[in-house]
């Protein structure tokens, strides 16, 4: 445990010592918040309005809260995974600098080195995503606050689980990378495409039926829906209190992916948690297997 603890401390220090990587990872979610609020708020507002029946009048404050919840959940869903790929580049940098060679000639096992990367990346990513989470809560406070204490804690749990999913996925992918260029290329691809694949930028319900079926197999889709459900539960409860018909509320949930369907069957929140947790375990198992197989070869 002493060797593992020293490795985790060493990896965390290297990450936070690299001011460029750290501040880029920290500022990115905040920049996304500004960009989302500036450019996507009107799109989300129009999507929400289109789900309402003709002539249905709703208070502007409730509309702002609905849009704010959708924006905040989108930012958190994207940041949990994209920041994970950024913070997990240390294993690639160690290959480039040759530090991994120095580590492997020590008495420390390869499995311990792998766990050290995973734990340090998880710690750094969770810290950054907690900052993003706090910024989103502040944003929701000013746009319209309908979250209970339970909603906040469940959203925090979603952030932690989605962060672990991002770390486990990036560990498997970054394991095969050996140059800085490869790491940058993968990070760019993930940053550009993940938001669309998980339904953060545009709701999956707006895609074609075939694409919806394909995306329903991706665990990140369910992570986004979990965060969105918990960020917006209070908004939907307020809609019900002021007399919104249940069909209208369900229509809104369908339009913004609070309700997800797997080949026509509505996916429950419990099932979403099961899918996300299973994906984490599967990718962790793959990461462990990769280290065992290639460790024996080396």
Image: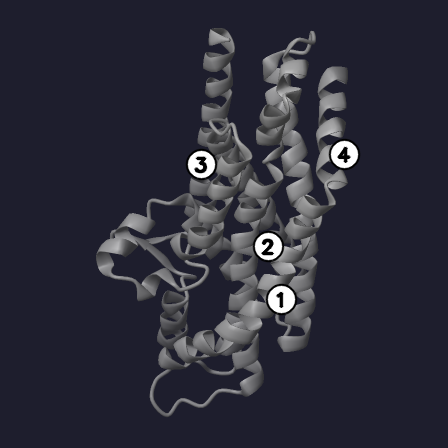
**Image coords of residue 11 (percent x, y):** 71, 30
Can residue 166 be seen in the rendering of this structure? Answer: yes
Left/right of residue 281 with respect to residue 213 in the rendered view: right
Disc number at residue 147? 1
Q: Residues within 10 Å of mark 2 (few under 14, many from 20)?
A: many
Residue with the mark numbered 4: 13
Left/right of residue 186 with respect to residue 111 in the rendered view: left
Between marks 3 and 1, how big is the CA–CA gap?
28 Å
Give the mark, 3 or 4, whose residue is nearer the N terminus. 4
From the viewer's perspective, is residue 197 above or below residue 36?
above
Give the mark, 3 or 2, whose residue is nearer the N terminus. 2
Q: Nearer the viewer, residue 167 or 62?
A: 167
Helix, strand, or loop for circle 2? helix
Residue with the mark numbered 2: 155
Is the Cβ of the residue at disc 1 closer than 8 Å to that at disc 2?
A: yes
Q: Which residue is drawn at the image coordinates 48% and 87% (left, top)?
A: 58
**Image coords of residue 210 (percent x, y):** 22, 55
Front: mark 3 or 4: 4
Q: Which residue is drawn at the image coordinates 68% and 40% (left, top)?
A: 124
Front: mark 3 or 1: 3
Is the Cβ of the residue at disc 4 closer than 8 Å to that at disc 1?
A: no
Disc number at residue 279? 3
**Image coords of residue 284 (percent x, y):** 50, 28
Is the Cβ of the residue at disc 3 closer than 8 Å to that at disc 4?
A: no
Between marks 3 and 2, how big is the CA–CA gap?
19 Å
Give the mark, 1 or 2, whose residue is nearer the N terminus. 1
Residue reaching furthest to the bottom: 55
């Amino acid at each position: 445990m002493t060797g593992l603890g020293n490795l985790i401390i060493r990896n965390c220090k290297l990450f936070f010592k690299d001011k460029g990587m750290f501040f880029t990872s920290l500022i990115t979610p905040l920049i996304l918040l500004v960009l989302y609020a500036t450019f996507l708020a009107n799109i989300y507002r129009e999507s929400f309005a289109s789900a309402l029946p003709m002539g249905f009048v709703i208070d502007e404050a409730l509309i702002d809260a609905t849009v704010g919840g959708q924006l905040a959940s989108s930012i958190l869903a994207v940041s949990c995974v994209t920041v994970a790929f950024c913070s997990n580049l240390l294993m690639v940098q160690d290959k480039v600098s040759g530090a991994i060679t120095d580590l492997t000639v020590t008495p420390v096992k390869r499995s311990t080195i792998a766990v050290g990367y995973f734990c340090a990346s998880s710690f750094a990513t969770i810290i950054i995503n907690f900052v993003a989470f706090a910024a989103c809560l502040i944003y929701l406070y000013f746009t319209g606050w309908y979250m209970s204490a339970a909603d906040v804690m469940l959203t925090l749990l979603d952030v932690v689980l989605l962060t672990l999913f991002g770390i486990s996925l990036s560990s498997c992918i970054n394991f095969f990378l050996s140059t800085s260029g490869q790491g940058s290329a993968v990070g760019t691809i993930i940053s550009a495409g993940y938001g669309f694949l998980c339904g953060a930028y545009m709701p999956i319900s707006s895609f074609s039926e075939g694409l919806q079926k394909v995306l329903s197999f991706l665990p990140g889709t369910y992570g986004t829906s979990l965060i969105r459900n918990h960020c917006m539960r209070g908004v939907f409860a307020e809609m019900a209190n002021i007399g919104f018909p249940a069909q209208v509320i369900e229509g809104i949930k369908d339009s913004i992916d609070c309700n997800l369907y797997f080949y026509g069957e509505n996916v429950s929140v419990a099932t979403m948690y099961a899918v996300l947790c299973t994906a984490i375990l599967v990718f962790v198992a793959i990461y462990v297997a990769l280290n065992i197989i290639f460790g024996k070869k080396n």
